[in-house]
Image (cartoon, rainbow, N blue to C red):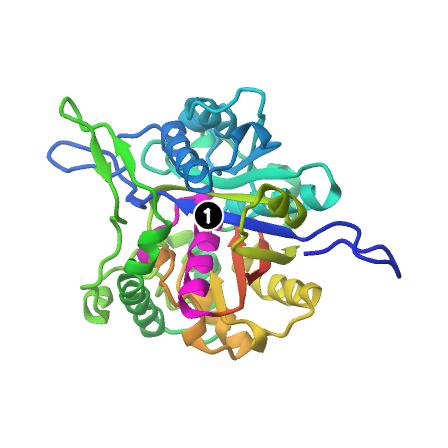
Amino acid sequence: MRRRREGGPVSRDSVVIVDAVRSPIGRGRLSRGDRPGGSLSSLHPVDLLAQVLVGLVGRTGVDPSIVDDVLIGCVSQASEQAFTPARLAWLAAGMPDHVPGVTIDRRCGSGQQAVEFAAHGILAGAYDVVIAGGVESMSRVPMGSARLGADVFGEGVQTRYAPGLIGQGVAAELVAQRYGITRRDMDDYAVRSHARAKSASSVMAGEIVSVIVPDGDGPRRKVTEDEVIRPETTADSLSRLKPAFADDPAAERYPDLEWGVTAGNSSQISDGAAVLLLMSEQKAEHLGLRPRARILSTAVVGSDPLLMLTGPIPATEKALARAGLALADIDHVEVNEAFASVPLAWQRHFKADGDRVNPSGGAIALGHPLGASGARLLTTMLGALEASGGRYGLQTMCENGGMANALVIERL
């Protein structure tokens, strides 16, 4: 990603990714009665993010005092995530207190947007060294809790899109209908996601930093592996699940929908954090650090807020055009698996090679800790490019309200 003057030379070095790490992904649920909680659910989200920050700084050996800012995506900024987790986690990690932090919300793309804002700041000369990523504990801060039961839309939006905006699950059904995606297509895709995640687990182990969590009154536990991959998943077992988003008002509004989106072919509620160290290429050279990748382009778009999950299509086109590349040049694609219909629609639109799309599995198998997912996808894509020898990677995410981010990286 380069900033150029009209007709002039490159005015600032490229933005590079020095390293990227993430926590294991834990199942998003608290302990209730005899039912155990997820592997990370006993850990405060600030302390979860703090441990991942310690892991990143420790792996790179970078002096934390030279970090200009910490940018962290987080969607549900309420309760334990209400007081700028970026800043608090940096302090909890024992890092220098002169380094500031900010928390960013672009819905599911929050972690990716944090990385993109970091890159933009470096290009503008506002930053030399930035840590960016995301965190979300969906166990401890449930999705939607920040609304406090209030109307978040207001009269103008409700009137414009009367009888009102819809939930993402219903939007996933509309996307499936538009692109001719069947329930079996989505279930088969979900099975592949779990199988691919299991197959890639040895490679992904290199991107995970272990996390220490409280364990009731007993000793603290070390969590080292993703909890949510289910390689035993079959299309037959998924076919027995009921549609998750069909209700009377939605059925009345959209009477032609076949209702095939289920908990099994949708992303998993989960807990996790991921962070990346970014800087200018010149700064990395000065510090003697070997970058892993270069950011070639970023893009963000708005899309129809009713058919809100198709934004990755124009975002992809915009990011590729800015990078000066065609989709055929891309070796690895990450399309966030919010619902199976999202990557399937993206593939059908671009007539893309399915083997290159989410080859390490995605959020259906690995979980979708909302604010962390954008950074998690980028971390996984980087490791997969290195393992395969690929050069270019593309990542794109749909977002509630009809938005999407995309970026293109080059492995170095």
- Residue sitting nearer the eye, 246 or 349: 349
| Quadrant the N terminus occupies | bottom right
Q: Residue furthest left?
A: 34
Residue type at the position of mark 1: Ala
Residue 336 in sight from this viewpoint? no
> Of helix, strand and loop, which one carries label 1?
strand
The picture places residue 195, in percent across and down from the top left corner, at 27, 67
Q: Is residue 39 above or below residue 358?
A: above
Where residue 24 appears, x then y in whole percent? 31, 45
Left or right of 195: which side holds 125?
Answer: right
Q: Position of residue 25 (x, y in %)?
A: 32, 46
Nearest the eye: 316 or 87: 87
Q: Which residue is at the far right?
A: 7
Q: Is residue 368 magenta?
A: yes
Q: Residue at x 49, y 66 (%)?
A: 333
The C terminus lies in which quarter of the figure?
A: bottom right
Q: Position of residue 12 (x, y in %)?
A: 75, 49
Which is the main secondary structure of the residues drawn in magenta? helix
Label count reads 1
Q: Which residue is mark 1?
A: 20
Residue 19 visible somewhere in the drawing: yes
Magenta stretch encompasses residue 107: no
Q: Could you classify mark 1 by the number of other residues whose Cα lies within 10 Å: few (under 14), some (14-19), or many (20 or more)? A: many
The residue positioned 35% from the left and 69% from the top of the image is 186
Q: Give whichever of 184, 22 is nearer the camera.
A: 22
**Is residue 208 toward the left or the right of residue 115 in the image?**
left
For image coordinates 52% across by 22% down, the residue present is 96
Which range is magenta? 365-389
